Image: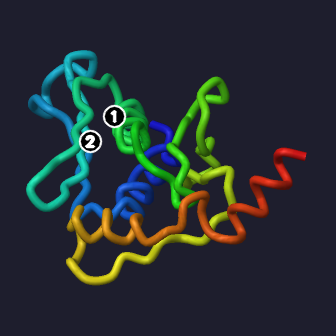
Amino acid sequence: MNDDIVIACANLVDRAGAAGFEIGHTGDDDEPAEDVQWYAFAAYRGARVISDGHRSPTAAALGLAERLLAGAMCRCTQPVTVSDSRPGCRWRLVGQRWEPSCDAAPVTVSGGGRGDMAAIQHAMAQVPPGGNRAARRAAKRRRR
C-alpha cells in the first residue's frame, strides 16, 4: 500500500467538504487476498462518491481522488485536470497532498455545515471569473 496516496485522498476528501470518508474491503478476513475487493467513498449530505472493485487500498484511494477531481472546479475557477493534455488547472499528487498548479487563495465556505453542497457551490460562485488577483497574475506570468 502506498500510504501517501491514501493520505492524500483523505486530505482531498476533507478539502472537498465531505462529511465523511471510508476505505475498506469486501469479504471475510480469511478470504484469499486476490479475491478481496477494495473500496473508498466520500460522504456528503444526501450523496456519496464511491470508487469500488479495486485490488488494493491504494487503487481505491486513487480512484476516489480521480472521481472527486474529474469535473471539479479549481479555486482559480478553471476546470480541474490531472492530465497535461487537457485544458484547465493541472492538479498533481505532491507527497501526501493533491495540489493545484495555480496559486489562487483557498475558498472559504461559510454556513451550511460540513458536506453541504449548496454552501460549497455558493462559495465558489463568489469567486470572480478568472480567479482572484493572485490567480490572474499567475496566469499572466505563465502565458509569457
**Going by the image, does 114 lie left or right of 57?**
left
Q: Whole-percent x and y of residue 14? A: 36, 63
- Are circles 2 and 1 on residues that touch, CB within 8 Å? yes
Q: Whole-percent x and y of residue 76? A: 58, 58
Rate crowding at label 2 as few (under 14), some (14 to 19) or many (20 or more) other CA atoms within 10 Å. many
For label 2, the residue is: 40
> Residue placed farthest to the front in the image?
129
Q: Residue type at mark 1?
A: Ala
Q: What residue appears at the point 62 percent right and 69 percent down from the top-left corner?
A: 132
Q: Is residue 45 visible?
A: yes
Above or below, comparing residue 83 to residue 114 in the picture = above
Q: Secondary structure at mark 2?
A: strand
Q: Whole-percent x and y of residue 80? A: 51, 43
**Going by the image, does 143 lie left or right of 131?**
right
Q: How many marks?
A: 2
Q: Secondary structure at mark 1?
A: helix
Q: Residue type at mark 2?
A: Ala
For label 1, the residue is: 60
Rate crowding at label 1 as few (under 14), some (14 to 19) or many (20 or more) other CA atoms within 10 Å. many
Q: What residue appears at the point 45 percent right and 53 percent down from the top-left corner?
A: 7
Determine which of the numbered discs, if any, sits on residue 118 in the image: none
**Going by the image, does 85 lie left or right of 141?**
left
